[in-house]
Amino acid sequence: MFYEPKNGHDLPHNPFNAIVSPRPIGWIATRGADGQDNLAPYSFFNAVAYVPPQVMFASTSSKPDRDGTKDSVANIRDTGVFAVNVVEYAARDVMNQTSGSWDRETDEFALAGIDKGECETINCPRVLNAPATLECKLTQIIQLPGEANFAVFGEVTGVHIRDNCLVDGKFDVTTFQPLTRLGYRDYSAIREVFSLQRPGE
């Protein structure tokens, strides 16, 4: 089949998210200017540069109490920092609990019973037992076409790695099985890896 998104797809559910998958999940931790902590997962997330290391995530909806966006973007806009926590398969249920549209006063760490740590290079909370956390300083927020679509870019200023995820000096994803987002309400976990050499190597 072929369809133009502007004309609709005539399917029971939008296939776009299923086509662009799997997607890593950035579990974004922020602290508001008022000191209120927030934690929410975003599947429009990825690394975008090596030197300096940079990541991005996109928020695509809004809350009535956040001036056209969500808690994460509003907090980052105010403070200029955020932390990206890697989601392991074992944390799928508590991660899902933090995805609700909670009031801005809700601390999702407390709501879901998640142990909270403090970042080293920024004033921000982090998921204490996450396989890895990237501490980030905001570089830019770009408003994308469409209502409430914002892309947030940050430079990584600190990296936490859980000790048992390092095997022979490498960050081994099979030790924790990263959770990935598919389409619809579907997820997957990475349990197997293989390597390929580039031509000429």
Image (cartoon, rainbow, N blue to C red):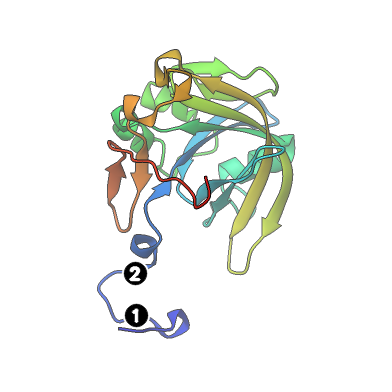
Q: Check the image and report above or below for 68 versus 55.
A: below
Residue 14: mark: 2
Question: Quadrant of residue 7 in the image?
Answer: bottom left
How far across and how far down the image is residue 24, in percent?
43, 44
What type is the residue that disc 2 sits on?
Answer: Asn
How far across and how far down the image is residue 187, in percent?
29, 47
Question: Quadrant of residue 94 in the image?
Answer: top left
SS type, badge 1: loop
Q: Mark 1 points at which residue?
A: 9
What type is the residue that disc 1 sits on?
Answer: His
Q: Residue at x 25, y 73 (%)?
A: 12
| Mark pair 1, 2: CA separation | 7 Å
Q: Which residue is drawn at 33% across and 24% down?
A: 175
How far across and how far down the image is residue 138, in percent?
71, 40
In this view, which residue lies farthest toward the front?
Answer: 200
Asked whether the viewer can see residue 78, the reply is yes
Q: Is residue 32 left or right of residue 95?
A: right
Relative to the observer, which residue lies in front, 132 or 122? 132
Q: State if disc 2 and disc 1 touch (CB < 8 Å).
A: yes
Relative to the observer, which residue lies in front, 49 or 101? 49
